[in-house]
Image (cartoon, rainbow, N blue to C red):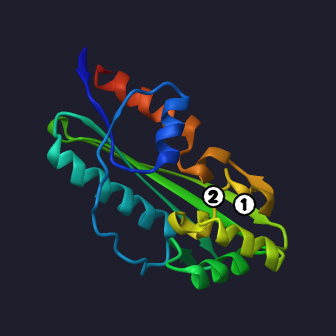
Amino acid sequence: MKTIDFILASASPRRQALLKQIGYTFKTQPSHVHEPAFTGSSPAPYAMELASLKATEIAKLYPQSLILGADTIVVIGNEVLGKPSDEASAREMLNLLSGQFHEVITAYTLQVADLDINEDHYVSTRVHFKTLKAHEIGKYIASGSPFDKAGGYGIQDYSSIFVDHIEGCFYNVVGLPLADFNSKMQQLLARHALILK
């Protein structure tokens, strides 16, 4: 068995909290890779590409460590919603999601460069918003919460009152599908005879 460092290639406080919630010890080294715009027709491969780019950037710096890169996107119709750039774009996104189903895809990549380990995974969750009132959207935007979140909302904060139905993993919407991630992680560690430090 070989012991190995585990590094999260993200500054996301939500992903850090989720990993701690299920007992993982890790270091944090945020990726600053340029994220290309979505131009294709299939959102899941796009999300996996983003997660892989993040992991690869940090794996080059720490080739002997196990790197986790992840990315969450919000999809409605054929449109991928990123993080809103200002109040107007946040309002536009929330109005678009109002009264509709949308899909939240979190992709994650596990890499160890020196061992040629490179695994890509993703999980999709369907989320439905109730019809939102203008004052609810305004209050949420005024809180500043939408601006670091794909689709302009975080299901774990005030916008939880927007969600009236969910199909799939709740934690996937927060930023990491815990059951799926833990299962894939434990399989990887067993397959390569690794133990996290």
Q: Earlier in the sequence, mark 1 or mark 2?
A: 2
Q: Is residue 138 above or below residue 149?
A: below
Q: Is residue 88 left or right of 102 when viewed as pictured?
A: left
Identify which residue, 90 or 108, lies in the foreground.
90
Residue placed at 18% from the left, 42% from the top? 113
Q: Dot 1 surroundings within 10 Å: few (below 14), some, or many (20 or more)?
A: many
Q: Dot 2 surroundings within 10 Å: few (below 14), some, or many (20 or more)?
A: some
Quarter of the image where the N terminus is located: top left
Question: Where's residue 68, x and y in %?
Answer: 36, 43
Q: Is residue 163 visible?
A: no
Q: Is residue 82 above or below residue 14?
A: below
Q: Are marks 1 and 2 in contact (CB under 8 Å)?
A: yes
Q: Is residue 94 above or below residue 21?
A: below
Quarter of the image where the C terminus is located: top left
Amino acid, disc 2: Gly
Question: Where's residue 72, x and y in %?
Answer: 50, 59
Instruction: Residue lying at the far top in this picture: please name it.
Output: 1
Query: Tag 1, which secondary structure?
Result: helix
Q: Which residue position holds label 2?
A: 154
Q: Is residue 104 left or right of 167 when viewed as pictured?
A: left
Question: Where's residue 148, x and y in %?
Answer: 51, 64
Amino acid, disc 1: Ser
